[in-house]
Image (tube, grey):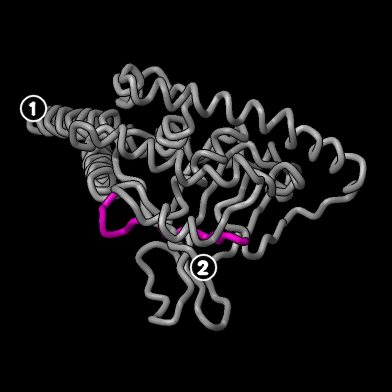
Amino acid sequence: MNMLHSLRIATVAAAMLVAAASSLHAQTATVDDTAKFLAGMMPSADSPLVPLTKEAAWQRHAKFLDSAFGQLEQRQLSRIRAWADTNLAAPKPTMFYMFSGPDFLYANAFYSKASTYVLSALEPVGSVPDLSRLPRGGIASALYNVERSLGSILSFSFFITKQMKTDLQAGQISGTLPILYVFLARSGVTVKSVSPISLDDQGAAYFAGENAGSNAVRGVRITHPELPRPYRAWGYPVTPVVFQLVTAFMMYYLLTERPVQSLLGLLIMFSGLLIYAVFRKRPDQAPVAVSSGHE
C-alpha cells in the first residue's frame, strides 16, 4: 500500500509540473511568431500575439509591409534569384557578408542554398521583448520604429549608416535583431531559436552563459529547421531508430522493475524542465546581433 501511495503521489506531482510548464510556455510568444508579427504576417493560431493583430496599428503595419515587400520582390529580389541560379552554379554552404547590417534579405536572395550565413557588423544587436506584455500604445510605437528602420533598404536596397545609428537605438525594440526577424519571416524562414554567441580574440566561440572576456565580439545565433543540413548521422535513418528503440526498452524495463525510483527520476527531470521554462528568457540575456550597415 505504501508503495502504491508513493507511486500515486509521484505521478500526480509529475503531471502538475508538466501542466505548469506547458501553461507557462503557452503564455510566451515563440521567436517565430514574434518574427512573423513584426513582419506584418499572422502568427500561429494559438500565439498570445494573435489578439494584437486586431489592433489598427498592426493592420496598417501589415498592409504597409505587404505592399513594400511585394514591390521589392517584383523590382529586385526575383531578378536577383534568377541571376544567382544562372551565375552561381556551385554555391558554398557558408555565406560570409562583411559590413552587412541586418541584411539577411539580399544575402538569402543571392545565396538561397547556403546552410550558414555569417553577417558581420558594428551596430548593436539589441533585443526584442515579449510583445504581448508591452504597455498600452507600445505596439504602435514599436511597429513604427521597425518601419522607420526599414525605410532605406526598402527604398534603395541598402542601409544608410547614419540613419541606422539613430533608428536602431529608439524605443523598446532596438538594434539589428528586430530587422533580422522581419527579413527572416519575409524570406519564408521559420525561426527555431535565437541565442547569444561571442567570439574571443582567438576566434573561439562562447555561447549563452559562458564568459568570453571583455574584448569579445558579441553576436547572436539564429537557427531554422528548413536549411539543408550537409551532415547526417552514420547509417541515417536506421541508427537513430535503433537508438530510440533501445532507449525505449531501457525505460520500460526500469519502470516495470523499479517503478518508485523511476518515477522519482522523472519527477526530477520534469522539475528541471519547469525551471528551464521559467529562466530561459531572462531579460539580462538579451541577444546581440551580427550585422552592420553600409553607405
Q: What stretch is highlighted in magenta?
A: 281-295
Q: Could one spot residue 261 in this view of the protein?
A: no
The circle drawn on residue 122 is 2
| Label 2 residue SS | loop
Q: In this view, does 237 lie to the left or right of 280?
A: right
Whether residue 179 is in magenta: the answer is no
Q: Distance between the residues labelled 2 and 1?
A: 66 Å
Tag 2 near tag 1, CB within 8 Å:
no
Give how far across and how far down residue 176 sits, in percent: 47, 53
Q: Is residue 274 left or right of residue 96?
A: left
Q: Which residue is drawn at 92% across and 41% down?
A: 86
Say which label, 2 or 1, has the lower sequence index. 1
Q: Which residue is drawn at 36% across and 21% down?
A: 53
Mark 1 — residue?
A: 1
The amino acid beneath tag 1 is Met
Taking depth in this image into account, of 235 and 7 the one nearest to the observer is 235
Give the quarter of the figure containing the C terminus: bottom right
Query: Crowding at label 2, few (<14), some or many (≥20) Cα neighbours within 10 Å?
Result: some
